[in-house]
């Protein structure tokens, strides 16, 4: 008996008489059958669908690529892992093993970094909402506190007295770097003098150790020149302190905001084409610092808090097709088992999606809906994909940043997260949630325990 | 029975031209095979039997795909109106 042929949905596509796009007509779609040598179908069979998978190899390679770009151009460089980008302990520890400090923005993240074993003196504490108790612990631990507003500055001065400590602080500076919008809600403004005023207050208090200057000019920044402007303005403040107080700043922290290979919604070109790359960013940041008037033997340490650019491409979300249908207007709809509850970043990215099995060259435009019974659950408004059927598997790329911190336990439970190590072995680094794990935070008053009348 | 308009043109490589609307279409290989069988006037049962023999496909999935395909042919004005009962 001869084997039956592989079935593909019968499809007919109208040829649109319009301008071809600049990429031409795509006739091939490359499937992604393996992640770091491990078969997607095996991973889904063993761990269920959907499933997050993180590549340790990609993280380490990206880190080294970024480090190389900066250390080639500047003598003293330090990375600090941005916990909010992905604070799964296994992921944080890869960065710490590579030499990253920790950059945290809440007491919760601070505790997480401590629990991961990082030296508290190597924790940078950012953010506008540091509770009094958080500040107290950070001061006692001699962590680096980046001050966001005057209320915080005054609290730290008071705590310095109370604890008889000299806290190590920096201020966050916001500024016009020529890009819109200006992120002026965090820190002190450069142009209107707020930043210089705060620095004077710190210096005149005599109670704080002003160790650095910090900025974080935006997110997914595609213009390296904006970082150049920011570096120049921080250098100006540092040199002003040197001139006025003979005070040397130990470091300049340029924050993060570097883009990944993801494609922003509405972008004309794919993210892989618009990303300037680490070399261009490093060139823009280090050139003003190298050319500034810092004494050659006293260049401040350059700290970078980039998160997304280091981890986004290491994350994959594996899933399965639930169904195909048509909208009222005849548009193809594909329902998948990955929704915006897991893929929060789909609100601003058009994620690249690859089938996990081979297909013919025939493709169709489809709208990808998640499994949630909510109208907002749209993963891609328009994706060109092969003819997917129920049960077909796929891989969503570039989900390492923010998806595993901003995900929601909404309607359904969150899945497992796997790490593929350098030898291609899979490790569960976060278990899938259960009804019990979610219900443990709830309690029902006695009079509501019985629902029968 | 589903009946295709007699003036719909199909090339060997799967291009379709509908002179009623002036529109052109492409078919994937499975679509071309199904298109030809519908054009020949084969009814659903004989098409279904043939597809289940040749392809690795479940009956219910093929039925859904067949209905979807024929629905599209209707929307592209390639089919004669359904006969009234």
Image (cartoon, helix red, strand yellow):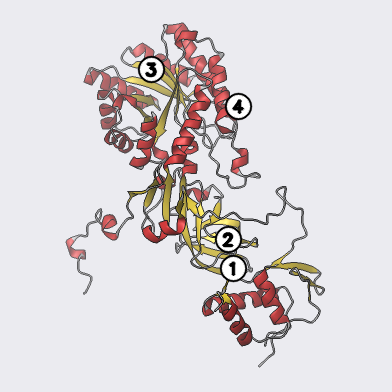
Q: Nearer the viewer, residue A167 or A435?
A: A435
Pointers 3 and 4 in contact (CB under 8 A)?
no
User: How far apart are the two marked residues, 2 and 3, measured between alpha carbons?
Assistant: 51 Å
Above or below, comparing residue A388 to residue A26 in the picture: below
Chain bearing mark 3: A
Q: Do labels 2 and 3 share a chain?
A: yes
Of the numbered discs 1 and 4, the one sitting upstream in the chain is 4
**Picture coordinates of residue A100, whole percent (x, y):** 39, 29
Q: Which residue lies furthest to the front in this view?
A: A1
The structure residue drawn at horizontal position 42% and vertical position 51%, both measured from the top left corner, is A52
User: How far apart are the two marked residues, 1 and 4, measured between alpha carbons?
Assistant: 45 Å
Could you say which quadrant of the image residue A201 lies in?
top left
Of the numbered discs 3 and 1, the one sitting upstream in the chain is 3
Could you say which quadrant of the image residue A2 lies in?
bottom right
Q: Can residue A412 be seen in this view?
A: no
Of the numbered discs 2 and 3, the one sitting upstream in the chain is 3
- Which residue is denoted by mark 4 in the rendering? A225
Q: Is residue A65 visible?
A: yes
Q: Do labels 1 and 2 share a chain?
A: yes
- Which residue is denoted by mark 1 in the rendering? A327
The structure residue drawn at horizontal position 33% and vertical position 55%, both measured from the top left corner, is A432
Q: Are marks 2 and 4 on the same chain?
A: yes
- Which residue is denoted by mark 3 in the rendering? A211
Q: Which of A157 and A115 is in front in this view?
A: A115
Q: In which quadrant is the C terminus of chain A drawn?
A: bottom left
Chain bearing mark 2: A
User: How far apart are the two marked residues, 3 and 1, measured between alpha carbons?
Assistant: 59 Å
| Element assignment for label 1 | loop
**Picture coordinates of residue A286, whole percent (x, y):** 54, 20
């Amino acid at each position: 008996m001869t084997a039956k042929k592989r079935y593909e949905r019968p499809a007919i596509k109208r040829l649109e008489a319009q301008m071809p796009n600049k990429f031409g007509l795509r006739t091939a779609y490359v499937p992604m059958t393996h992640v770091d040598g491990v078969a997607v179908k095996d991973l889904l069979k063993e761990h269920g669908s959907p499933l997050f998978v993180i590549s340790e190899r990609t993280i380490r390679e990206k880190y080294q690529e970024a480090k190389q770009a900066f250390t080639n151009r500047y003598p003293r460089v330090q990375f600090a892992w941005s916990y909010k980008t992905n604070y799964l302990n296994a992921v944080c520890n890869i960065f710490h093993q590579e030499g990253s400090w920790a950059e945290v923005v809440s007491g919760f993240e601070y505790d997480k970094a401590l629990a991961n074993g990082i030296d508290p003196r190597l924790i940078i504490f950012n953010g506008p909402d540091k509770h009094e108790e958080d500040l107290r612990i950070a001061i006692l631990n001699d962590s680096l506190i980046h001050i966001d507003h005057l209320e915080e500055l005054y609290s730290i001065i008071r705590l310095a007295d109370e604890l008889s400590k000299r806290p190590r602080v920096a201020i966050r500076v916001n500024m016009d770097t020529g890009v819109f919008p200006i992120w002026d809600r965090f820190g002190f403004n450069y142009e209107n003098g707020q930043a210089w005023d705060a620095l004077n207050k710190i210096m005149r208090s005599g109670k704080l150790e002003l160790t650095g200057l910090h900025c974080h000019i935006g997110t997914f920044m595609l213009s390296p020149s904006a970082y150049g402007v920011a570096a120049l303005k921080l250098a100006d403040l540092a040199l002003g302190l040197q001139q006025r107080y003979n005070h040397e700043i130990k470091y300049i922290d340029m924050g993060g905001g570097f883009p990944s290979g993801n494609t922003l919604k509405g972008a004309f070109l794919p993210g892989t084409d618009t990303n300037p790359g680490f070399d261009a960013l490093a060139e823009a940041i280090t050139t003003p610092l190298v050319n500034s008037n810092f004494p050659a033997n006293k260049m401040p340490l350059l700290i970078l808090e980039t998160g997304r650019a280091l981890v986004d491409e290491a994350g994959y979300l594996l899933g399965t097709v639930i169904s195909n249908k048509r909208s009222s207007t005849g548009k193809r709809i594909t329902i998948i088992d990955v929704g915006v509850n897991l893929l929060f970043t789909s609100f601003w990215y058009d994620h690249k999606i690859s089938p996990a099995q081979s297909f013919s060259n025939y493709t169709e435009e489809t709208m990808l809906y998640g499994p949630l019974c909510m109208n907002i659950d749209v993963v891609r408004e328009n994706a060109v994909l092969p003819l997917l059927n129920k049960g077909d598997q796929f891989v969503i790329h570039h989900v390492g940043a923010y998806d595993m911190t901003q995900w929601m336990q909404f309607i359904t439970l969150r899945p497992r997260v796997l790490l593929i190590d350098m030898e291609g072995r899979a490790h569960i680094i976060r278990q899938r949630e259960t009804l019990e794990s979610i219900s443990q935070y709830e309690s029902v008053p006695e009079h509501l325990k019985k629902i029968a009348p | 029975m589903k009946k295709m308009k007699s003036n719909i043109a199909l090339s060997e490589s799967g291009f379709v031209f509908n002179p009623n609307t002036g529109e052109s279409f492409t078919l994937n290989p499975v679509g071309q095979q199904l298109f030809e069988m519908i054009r020949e006037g084969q009814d659903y049962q004989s098409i279904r039997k043939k597809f289940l023999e040749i392809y690795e496909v479940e009956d219910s999935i093929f039925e859904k795909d067949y209905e979807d395909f024929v629905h599209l042919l209707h929307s592209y004005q390639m089919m004669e109106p359904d006969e009234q009962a």
